[in-house]
Image: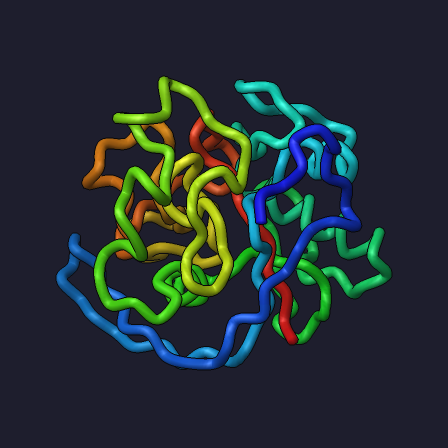
């Protein structure tokens, strides 16, 4: 199911997919560590947040590439969690984040509002029961350097994974909730999935990157929202 590109998406059309409980083994190529995460069921947006959705909620238009059903990009991690809080308020849900000054942000794991997925949730949902580095043939599922023509593309135009999630790889990287390695990188947060400017090796379900939560914004980095069940 592709979005109707002639009908800009608003907050009521953020389509959430129920992701079943399960477990996922993660790894970090830098430290060579592996660990397993057990996951309860959760909801994850079928598409990355679009520019129309972001504008409807925030009245801001930060993206470098303009288009209502293009994924929003050039947003920081703090921008993403602020969007989650505003969206929660509009939907009558309890916000997940308390946003203070600079990087002073606390998370309420019991809140029923919108949030960013954890990286374990993200990778588990991306793989959708598969075991390889991708859930399909790359050109069929992702916009990346070889086929993106130096730009983002409307969400939902490539093939989804087995759980009906689109653009999990390519198009834009996606912010996750987790701090990467506080002892080495401080408050840096994790990004996943690869983007339109990445080579093939950058678009894998297992790739982990990180950046600063308030100052880092770039034209191939966006996000999608999650919710507790």
The residue shown at (13%, 62%) is 32
Q: Is residue 16 above or below residue 174?
A: below
Q: Where residue 72 appears, x then y in whole percent? A: 58, 33
Q: How many marks?
A: 0
Residue 67: image quadrant is top right
Residue 10: image quadrant is top right
Q: Is residue 207 above or below residue 102?
A: below
**Is 136 or 74 nearer to us in this picture?**
136
**Is 56 or 17 nearer to us in this picture?**
17
Q: Where residue 174 appears, x then y in whole percent? A: 46, 45
Q: Where residue 141 appears, x then y in whole percent? A: 36, 44
Q: Where residue 203 appears, x then y in whole percent? A: 28, 43
Residue 144: image quadrant is top left
Q: How is the image coloured?
A: rainbow
The residue shown at (59%, 55%) is 45
Task: Name the quarter where the C terminus is drawn.
Answer: bottom right
The residue shown at (39%, 66%) is 128
Q: Residue furthest left?
A: 32
Query: 76 left or right of 100?
Result: left
The residue shown at (16%, 55%) is 29
């Amino acid at each position: 199911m592709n979005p109707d590109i002639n009908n800009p998406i608003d907050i009521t059309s953020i389509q959430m997919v129920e992701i079943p409980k399960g477990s996922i083994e993660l790894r970090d190529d830098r430290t060579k560590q592996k660990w397993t995460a057990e996951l309860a069921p959760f909801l994850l947006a079928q598409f990355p947040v679009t520019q129309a959705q972001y504008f409807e909620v925030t009245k801001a238009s930060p993206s470098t590439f303009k288009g209502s059903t293009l994924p929003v990009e050039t947003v920081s991690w703090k921008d993403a969690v602020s969007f989650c809080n505003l969206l929660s308020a509009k939907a009558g849900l309890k916000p997940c984040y308390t946003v203070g000054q600079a990087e002073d942000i606390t998370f309420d794991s019991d809140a029923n509002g919108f949030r960013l997925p954890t990286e374990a949730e993200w990778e588990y949902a991306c793989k959708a029961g598969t075991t390889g580095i991708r859930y399909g043939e790359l050109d069929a599922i992702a916009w990346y350097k070889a086929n993106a023509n130096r730009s983002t593309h409307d969400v939902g135009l490539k093939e989804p994974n087995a759980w009906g999630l689109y653009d999990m790889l390519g198009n834009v990287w996606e912010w996750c909730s987790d701090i990467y390695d506080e002892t080495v990188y401080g408050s840096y947060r994790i990004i996943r999935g690869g983007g339109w400017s990445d080579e093939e090796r950058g678009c894998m379900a297992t790739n982990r990157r990180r950046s600063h939560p308030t100052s880092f914004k770039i034209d191939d980095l966006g996000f999608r929202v999650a919710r507790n069940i």
